[in-house]
Amino acid sequence: MTETYNAKNLSVLEGLDAVRKRPGMYIGTTDSQGLMHCLWEIIDNAVDEALAGACNRIIVTLHTDGSIEVADNGRGIPVDVEPKTKLTGVEVVLTKLHAGAKFGNDSYNAAGGLHGVGSSVVNALSSRLDVEVDRNGNTYHMAFHQGHPGVYQDGDAQHRSPDTPFKRTRKNKPTELEITGKVGAKTTGTRVRYWADPEIFNDTARFDYDQLIDRVRQTSFLVPGLKITVIDESIPETGDVAVDDFLEIDGPRLDEASAFNGTVESDESDASHDTIGSSDEDSDEPSQMASIGEQDRAGHKRVEEFVHTGGVEDFVDFLSHGEPVSDIWHISGQGTYKEETQAVDANGDLHAEHITRQCGVDIALRWINGYDTTLRSFVNVVETPGGGMHVDGFLQSLTKQVRKTVEDNARKFKVNLKDSNTRIERDDILAGLVAVVTVRIAEPQFQGQTKDVLGTAPVKGIVSRMTDRQFGEMITGSRRGFKEQSGRVLEKITSEMHARIQARKTKEVTRRKNALESASMPPKLSDCQPGNDDVAELFIVEGDSALGTAKAARNSAFQALLPIRGKILNVQKASLSQILANKECSAIIQVVGAGSGPNFDIEQARYDKLIMMTDADVDGAHIRILLLTLIYRYMRPLIEFGHVYAAVPPLHRIALAGSHKGEYIYTYSDDELAGKLDQLKRQRIDFNPEVQRYKGLGEMDADQLADTTMDPRTRMLRRIRMEDAAQASDVFGLLMGDDVPPRKQFIIDNADDFDRSKIDT
């Protein structure tokens, strides 16, 4: 087959048409992720003004027609004519790829939007975009449709819509900005309002309000003193404080919203800049984009405000969930590096230039009990979830300094330097670590437009040297006030190492082909028959007397028994080395057979159900919470995937008489007993007035224990669930931790809700 192939077969996409043709190249996807990425581009431009010291106020407004507006009180996009293109600065920024002030070395020392495509890409992917700029005492306005400048035939400037008639500006004809109002001479700022184009984004694209709040909150931590407000106009006004009451408007109003119910997450800083100027009312008619932006937004306030002054230290404190092992440690400083870059000369041409860059480093870290790691990294407030050079430098020096300090104190931490296995690994250090790593540099090199990974190589050395010096002083205790803290941190890290080594050994020996032949199992374990792992049940039984009855009551085909002697160790207050030295705790971990902590592998668990079978009294309840603390801290997936249960043994047994002789009724509280006896009397059913009261599982015979507690056909079990991991961690810390006053206050606050029927009286 012969086909003609010549120049007429070639297509040339001009301007922003390439963005609309291949949006994934610029925003990653056209689903919800891409939809949110467009918003990040606009917000980042406003934040860059804050990083430059020109802005301290940003307002994000979610309009009811699906459009989103971002306003700032920065310097405002330039409105004068750019010499090379003969277009105004506003049109250059919003219609030309790789255009902006961030390619030079004067306007921004550190910025998040660095590729010069953010605003123009959002413009290209919007069915409509309006921009307003306050500069020179005027408010300038310009509108775009799918990236092309022009004029909308809006009947009312306060009710704009992408569906109104649009007249496109003729090609290559400069578009003059429209002056729509006056502002104070010192008032500056930019407002961008856009409607995402449903022709671009797929049907699954949904706006994520919680993701927006998380992003705004993290930005307020990273830029101390910057106040960011989110206004969701789909939430009805409920207050009597007007927006104008907290925005000292010098020019046209931000909008006509009148309610302010925002929350300030930290102490506010006094505003020193002029405030934000005008924006537009929402359209009463929903746009084409409404279906993409719609979602149930119940459960949050109309206005939420964020401002923090403590920087990354406040951020780490916010991210910390659990009992702290150390205070928040801070590493900061400046470094320089040389880099060859392409600079724009006076004629607009690019040429190679060697310049010296400044790199600001700001890191906060702490350790908390537990083994989860929370490590967040940023470059100029842009999150780098894939890490990069700054994270590599930080972790490299962190590992180096911890290893050196442990080796220097090997005897203290029971580390055998002759054993190659007893070596601190990075995972040991990361367990329980909460850290925020930020750097600020001009023109960072990211891997891709989505900026997931920092690729500027010299940053690694700067962060590494700074961490070496400052963290080294902290972890060795040579810096004043750190000796006790560093001791606790190193104890935790070495305990993690010992636990990892022990868990590996445990995993190796507990993988059984025949559990009955496993010499490593605790001698008191009464195991079930092999081959039933998918239905096997492990009963943790309180006491040897209950064990004897349970042995006769169980079905040995799939039910295993492990007795414990009273109350086990409170692991919330213990180190890993103490836990592993405790016979009861180590036996439970060993019998489950899936390891512990970060090495826990639920696929290796030897039982489908782990059932706590304790007496129905106060001591039994205490034993259950101690067991749950152990499971939550070191075998958490068992709870997360619903494999942990509490047996519910009865408190009383009523023996029926007369025609019902040989039948029994079990009750589980004193109130239930009284009600059941009254019911029997009303029904004239005879019963033995001497009701049997069980003081413990050991008082039941095998048949009674099987019927009430062990036989799957007749027993009652309570599944332990964990809907919120962070809340569960806080509760365990409150109930089982070292800090007594909060626990006392919890008891006082909840005394009125105490249900006596839930405990043995």
Image (cartoon, rainbow, N blue to C red):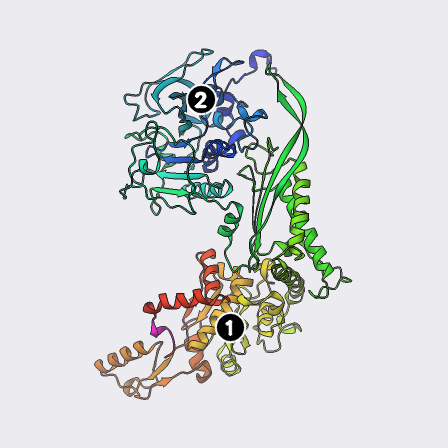
Secondary structure under the numbered disc 1 in the rendered image: strand
Q: Are marks 1 and 2 in contact (CB under 8 Å)?
A: no
Above or below: residue 466 compared with residue 371: above
Give the x, y percent position of residue 496.
Answer: 63, 61
Q: Quadrant location of the C terminus? A: bottom left
Q: Which residue is mark 2?
A: 147
Q: Is residue 757 magenta?
A: yes
Residue 732 included in the magenta stretch of the image: no
Q: Is residue 295 left or right of residue 341?
A: left
Q: Which mark is residue 539?
A: 1
Across and down, in percent, residue 568 comes to 54, 74
Closer to us: 683 or 438: 438
Three-letter code for the amino acid on which mark 2 is drawn:
Gly
Q: Quadrant of residue 674?
A: bottom left
Which sits in the foreground, 337 or 585?
337
Q: Main secondary structure of the magenta part?
A: helix
